[in-house]
Image (spheres, helix red, strand yellow):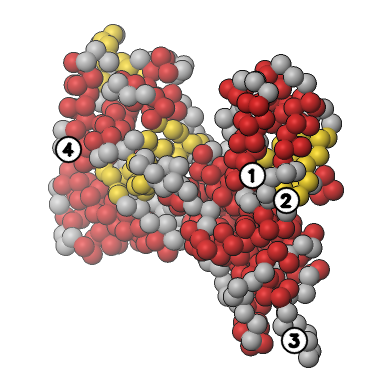
Amino acid sequence: MTPAALADLLHAVAVDVLTERGLDTAVLPETVTVERPRNPEHGDYATNIALRSAKKAGVAPAELAGWLATRLEDTDGIATAEVAGPGFLNLRLAADAQAGIVAAVLAAGEGYGHADTLTGQAINLEFVSANPTGPIHLGGARWAAVGDALGRVLAAQGAAVTREYYVNDAGAQIDRFAESLIAAAEGRPVPENGYGGAYVGEVAKKVVETEEGVLDQPDDQKLAAFKRLGVEVMLDEMRASLEAFGTHFDVWSSELALHESGAVEKAVQDLKDGDALYFAEGAWWMRSTDQGDDKDRVVIKSDGRPAYIAGDIAYYRDKRARGADLAIYMLGADHHGYIHRLKAVAAAFGDDPARVEVLIGQLVNLVRGGEPVKMSKRAGTIITLEDLVDAVGVDAARYTLARSSVDQVLEIDLDLISSRTNENPVFYVQYAHARLASLARNAADLGVSAQDPDLALLTHPREGDLIRTLGEFPRVLASAAGLREPHRVARYLEELAGAYHRFYDTCRVLPQGDEEPAGIHTARLALCSAARQVLANGLGLLGVSAPERM
């Protein structure tokens, strides 16, 4: 019996109890809270359903809790139900109910934890979207890990997820990038406000090799060629870096293409015609203050040129035209103002602003030996995704970047995440999986099978703790998807690894010496198979490998 199944059971029992006494069942919460007590002596699970419902039903919480406890103790799957404090219920599951969790994991396999709560919803998930003017930096690396993991978690809840990269290949920053490339190709210093770093020279060399005579062209043609080819070279490098990091995008959308196709002009004109924009002070404005912005935003400037938000308007419309029910934007720490602006864009097209969600990610800092890591030689002023991967590997980088809430500044200790100790979270989790894989190999050598286990034999407290931890996985995934917080999966995996290590140190799984295999060995081996499966499932959702050996 998983926590979700127990919550359903509690609700059904509460409905029966209230109905029998002629009380209104509408007072019951739509979602029943079921939690694992910190102190195992208080039971396997606890619920506050009586506290939340009693007053509305016109009875004392302790009285309602007592009614529920009496009924629950006569219910299959519940061993004991006790009233605690002012009206809490502490519950212990029967052995066969706990066994059902292990059976459910083994039956579902790779699908354990998945649900259909988001089935039918098309989600456009935009992340990274770093300007194509340099290698992907640490902030982009964080979004690559978190965004990819979030896409996997949402898909595990049934959503149809489109992972999208928005290429900002229009605007002044592209002009400065091209001018920097030309300067490098011609052996001149970096222009004022230009781009430095060894990579600029590398990209410039590729442009010169790609288009013969490009440096001999008139200045306007030369600038256009370096803009076009420089962006192409940089995007090829970005794609390669991201794919090597395990992050794949379904769509790469071009800002420049939106302008050149007329999509920006048409979208803005449609908003003008629909009275979603207003004209003042020689410019066209969007009423973004209606969505909480600190001021209305200019869409078309007084000189007739589009402001940056004009591209965002066309881009949102393009996403919706491609079928997105929800657009999630994952943006950097300096983009807080975009939350209200992008919601205002949705509202301007007559959509519910809730169709836009904006997640803001904070900065990432690297330290080694307590000191900040020096800047990248290739990029000059930034540390790149490739620098991090070269230092610690893909698995450690992805796991570490994804295991903390993105609204917190993240400090990564390179010495810690490179270590092979239990203090290193990714090692701790991966080692648990490798240990389980080794156990399975040893069992095969001994001829011990996990087939047809008597799971009711799993009555040891450490077994129960591990089983209940396995039962939490579906709820963790649902929460991670609903809150857009894939770090919850990583923290759960660390809890699961701990529960497994404690179980293994206490409960002997395989027979020793001349001991014949018995039912308890088969049951414990089945439990270990379930733990291995859930660890693999969770690591897979983070895009991290589940090693067989370490």
Q: Which amino acid is tagged 1? A: Leu
| Camera-side residue of 479 and 391 | 479
Residues at discs 4 and 3 in contact (Cβ within 8 Å): no
| Camera-side residue of 90 and 419 | 90
Task: Name which residue lies at 24% across and 12% down.
Answer: 275
C-alpha span from label 4 to label 2: 64 Å
Determine the secondary structure under disc 2: strand
Numbered disc in front, either 4 or 2: 2
C-alpha span from label 3 to label 2: 30 Å
C-alpha span from label 4 to label 3: 76 Å
C-alpha span from label 3 to label 1: 37 Å
Task: Name which residue lies at 79% across and 63% down.
Answer: 460
Q: Residue furthest front?
A: 20
Residues at discs 2 and 1 in contact (Cβ within 8 Å): yes
Residue 93, numbered circle = 2
Residue bearing the label numbered 1: 6
